[in-house]
Image (cartoon, grey):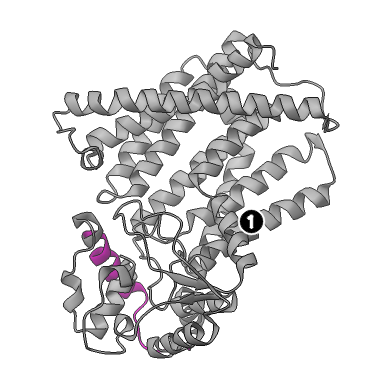
Amino acid sequence: MEKSSRLLELARFLQDPHLVARFQHICGVRGTFSRTAVGGGNDREATPSETQDNGACYHQLEEDHGGETMGMDMGSAGVRNRVVDSKKHHDEDFPHNGSLPTRTPEASVSDHSGAMTDEAGAASRVKPLRRNSLTGDAGQEFLIENRIFYYLFTFGTELGNEFFYITFFPFLLWNVDAFVSRRLIMVWVWVMYLGQCTKDVIGWSRPASPPVVKVEVFYNSEYSMPSTHAMSGTAIPFALFFMTCDRWEYPFTLGFVLALCWCLLVCVSRIYMGMHSVLDVIVGVFYSILILLLLLPALDVIDNFVLTCVHAPLVIVCLHLGLGLFSFTLDTWSTSRGDTAQILGSGAGIALASHVNHRLGLMPDPERLPLSLPALSGGLVGTAALRFLLGVLVLVATRALMKALTIPLVCRLMAIPGDDMRKARQHMEVELPYRYIVYGTVGFNVVFLVPLLFSYLALC
């Protein structure tokens, strides 16, 4: 009993938003919150922009203002429902009983206000790079006193964003090792799918702002536990390391250190950005490790089935589509649903293309192992860059064409008005087939069409 109470107390401490705020303060991030935004005065209510449209923040403001702010417009009815549900769930698991050794919001604001008046001359006033993908909120300005940390952790958080995935995986497949890339994408699909579904099942909101400064707001409307950035930031580098340590000739220690640095950079960046509590990140890391322990030993069997089984195409399509349908029933509309369908569609397209390549004898896996790293030369770099640029152009054109064709067609088939594409895509009947078909086609072209084009142009 005593041990469980200590674990619960530790969990409360690691989930405390003031712990995130203190880390941001150490790294030179200062908020621009007003006292009324955190309950320091009663002259007016805080506006949605001051609260960053964050579920946890609305819970804090409800306590400070007697529940008046719960009626405020949060950008969409879906977000409002998600906030109320996550608030209820959060309070049941972690009741606020004052046991945490934290600063009060007033103290936090005093620190931030002091930083603004005393150090504003040396700080840069910045806004989040991208708007919230659900509400359109651009976020609140904040002060950056350490630009090195800002650029470092911005890069770290991009290692878990869509732009990184759509550049890293194709580059690895076209220029380095198609065998490793194919299996790494399998790991990525399962890790991200399980992480996104777990988020919607648990339903915990993001760290409250204030006291946390929202350096990023793009995913602020999604749930928080576990951190899927931490999951992908753990799974991708360590799976890549374990898949290549016996396949390629390179120092074992160097590979492990690079994987560890990659993981730490992504994980710490999510706390710096104010997107996750320390508990979210820790759970994300261990959850990812558990998935890797179960999945890596089974990759040979899974990969062999995908490549050789006659019924593999049907199983691939049905399995990924069924998983997408399941994820869409877990919650009201949010960007996480579309992202999950996008990941599943990409995984299905890549698996189908791998099956077709094997059937046609294209892109055979090398037989002589271990592989040695080639010597860098101008010709090698130029050819790799040309392959990458040409391949990306094909993928961009594929995505644009399929998107232009699929959304109006699905809207017409499902009798859903297509005048407002943003609203139309909030219907499961539109978004699931749209994401699945578009990104399934993109994934198929990554593995089949683009390498076929390279072969035709003698770029292999």
Quarter placement of the C terminus: top right
**Residue at the spot of label 1:** 263
Image coordinates of residue 458 in percent, x first then y, are 69, 12
- Residue at 48% across, 86% down: 117
* The magenta stretch spans residue 228: no
Q: Is residue 197 above or below residue 454?
A: below
Q: Nearer the viewer, residue 221 or 87?
A: 221
Q: Is residue 93 above or below residue 234?
A: below
Q: Nearer the viewer, residue 438 or 378?
A: 378
Q: Is residue 361 left or right of residue 40?
A: right
Image coordinates of residue 345 in percent, x first then y, are 42, 31
- Residue at 30% across, 50% down: 334
Q: Is residue 125 above or below residue 459?
A: below
- Residue at 26% across, 48% down: 333
Label 1, residues with CA under 10 Å away: few <14, some 14-19, many ≥20: many
Q: Is residue 196 left or right of residue 56?
A: right
* The magenta stretch spans residue 83: yes
Specify start and end residues of the magenta stretch as a single range. 81-102
Secondary structure category for the residue under label 1: helix
